[in-house]
Image (tube, rainbow, N blue to C red):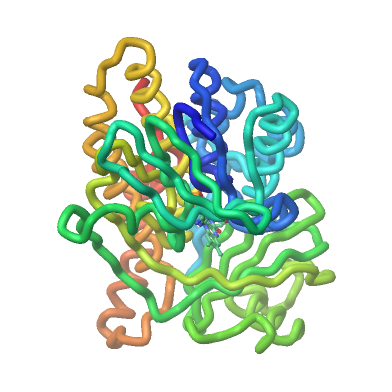
């Protein structure tokens, strides 16, 4: 099989890239290791920045997101029983939208298949041959058979555990990593959510109250990295959430049926450069941010936008200039997003290695933010638009 662009992975990075390339008349084939059911059921991110919202709408794929997505105008941070409320439109002139990543993925997959464009599920890529040549070849397994896909470019959109990053020779790629010794236990609950996105810093640990609709709450608890969802009873989850959200009288957080549990490990990671010959890495395949910044999916979309523009230039006029600058053009944005996500993680979580002095500094930072509109605007601006891509 032959195509212009071989896309490895049907997550946000790969699916947005496929649709963006099509708008430029560029053919691609998406190879996804998992089944459609698995990919569409995977619960992950929830916050869409305006750049992601606009991209979905410009692709003509935003109708359900605009109908079912929830506009988020506020960001609350609680500590010492008090709340810092960030009025996003007041501070930045923007808001964000809450719309589950799995809903975005469903919309993109549905459109891709409706348009009859190649998206092959249960097609696991095992090797990329000739990434640094003009005609790379992707080797994958499908229906028990070894197959190949010849192409001009390979887009490695296969996430942190994919194979594409490994196709870049040792000496060429540099990785930067920070691992945290805590993780997030996430639950989906059939109960009305809090009115605003609410992050908390409590002596017992971090908690986050988000939502998927006005009747589905998405709640998170900081737990040790070695913990497991099955270690927690529903009652223990509710006890910790009420406590960490300073909801001692249990009147704020509405309890309900916990119908989904998952764990997300926290790490900050970036690999540089994001390209090697005719292989281009995008999304989690090349960077990971702790989810405290709500950036992972938005970063993946921003990478896809830059990459699609570079590939469109090449196929329309043969110029590689934009493609050769892909890594450089994405680099600073990615580092700034990692910085923000690491800052918010450091501000809101309990650290086993923290001294009493460190704890005092952390709470004083929150006190300072509570009294400084400039500090609040700094956080709000990064929450709503760090994944902006200059057109
Ligand atoms: P993805 O990982 O979404 O997609 C990669 C795809 O490639 C997958 O479908 C995979 O099956 C496929 N693949 C892998 N290897 C392959 C191979 N060899 N051949 C073919 N296909 C292959 N972000 C937030 O902002 N908020 C959150 O709360 C949040 N929670 C998260 C929880 C978890 C458990 C994880 C892992 C991530 C979370 N993220 C969160 C980040 C997440 O949203 C990512 O940033 C986002 O999925 C990035 O999209 P992609 O780069 O497309 O990678
Ligand atoms: C979510 O709704 O899943 C969510 C919201 C904010 C975050 C992370 C995840 O920082």
Residue 211 is situated, as x and y percent measured from the top left of the image, at 69, 54
Residue 34 is situated, as x and y percent measured from the top left of the image, at 64, 56
Q: Is residue 336 visible?
A: yes
Give me the residue at 48% from left, 81% from top.
Answer: 225
Give me the residue at 34% from left, 49% from top.
Answer: 337
| Vertical arrangement, residue 183 with respect to residue 281, above or below | below
Give me the residue at 40% from left, 33% from top.
Answer: 388
| Vertical arrangement, residue 107 with respect to residue 361, above or below | above
Q: Is residue 263 left or right of residue 338?
A: right
| Vertical arrangement, residue 135 with respect to residue 59, above or below | below
Residue 194 is situated, as x and y percent measured from the top left of the image, at 69, 57
Give me the residue at 55% from left, 48% from top.
Answer: 147
Looking at the image, the residue that sits furthest to the top is 317
Q: Is residue 174 left or right of residue 167?
A: left
Q: Quadrant of residue 371?
A: bottom left
| Vertical arrangement, residue 143 with respect to residue 189, above or below | above
Q: Looking at the rendering, in which quadrant would you find the C terminus? A: top left
Residue 352 is situated, as x and y percent measured from the top left of the image, at 37, 86
Considering depth in this image, is 100 or 115 the residue closer to the camera? 115
Considering depth in this image, is 94 or 360 the residue closer to the camera? 94
Q: Looking at the rendering, in which quadrant would you find the N terminus? A: top right
How many numbered callouts?
A: 0
Q: Quadrant of residue 23?
A: top right
Q: Is residue 91 visible?
A: no
Q: Quadrant of ligand 2?
A: bottom right
């Amino acid at each position: 099989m032959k195509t212009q662009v071989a896309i490895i992975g049907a997550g946000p990075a790969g699916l947005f890239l496929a649709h963006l390339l099509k708008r430029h008349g560029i053919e691609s084939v998406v190879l996804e290791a998992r089944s459609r059911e698995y990919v569409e059921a995977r619960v992950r991110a929830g916050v869409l920045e305006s750049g992601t919202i606009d991209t979905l709408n410009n692709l003509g794929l935003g109708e359900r997101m605009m109908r079912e997505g929830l506009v988020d105008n506020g960001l609350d941070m609680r500590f010492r029983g008090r709340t810092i409320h960030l009025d996003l439109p007041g501070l930045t002139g923007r808001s964000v939208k809450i719309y589950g990543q799995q809903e975005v993925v469903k919309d993109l997959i549905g459109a891709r298949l409706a348009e009859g464009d190649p998206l092959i599920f249960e097609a696991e890529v095992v090797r990329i041959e000739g990434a640094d040549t003009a005609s790379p070849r992707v080797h994958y397994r499908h229906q028990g058979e070894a197959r190949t896909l010849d192409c001009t470019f390979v887009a490695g959109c296969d996430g942190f555990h994919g194979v594409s990053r490994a196709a870049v020779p040792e000496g060429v790629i540099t990785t930067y990593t920070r691992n945290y010794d805590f993780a997030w236990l996430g639950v989906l609950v059939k109960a009305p959510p809090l009115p605003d996105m609410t992050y908390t810093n409590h002596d017992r640990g971090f908690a986050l109250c988000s939502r998927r609709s006005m009747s589905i709450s998405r709640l998170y608890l900081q737990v040790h990295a070695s913990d497991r969802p099955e270690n927690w009873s529903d009652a223990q989850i509710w006890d910790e959430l009420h406590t960490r959200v300073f909801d001692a009288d249990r009147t704020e957080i509405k309890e309900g049926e916990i119908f989904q549990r998952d764990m997300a490990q926290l790490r900050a990671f970036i690999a540089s450069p994001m390209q090697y010959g005719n292989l281009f890495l995008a999304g989690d395949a090349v960077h990971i941010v702790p989810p405290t910044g709500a950036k992972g999916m938005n970063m993946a979309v921003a990478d896809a936008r830059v990459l699609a523009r570079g590939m469109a230039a090449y196929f329309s006029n043969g110029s590689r200039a934009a493609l050769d600058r892909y890594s450089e053009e994405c680099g600073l944005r990615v580092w700034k997003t990692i910085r923000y996500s690491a800052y918010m993680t450091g501000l809101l979580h309990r650290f086993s290695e923290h001294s009493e002095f460190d704890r005092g500094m952390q709470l004083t930072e929150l006190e300072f933010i509570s009294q400084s509109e400039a500090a609040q605007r700094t956080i709000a601006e990064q929450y709503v638009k760090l994944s902006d891509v200059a057109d």
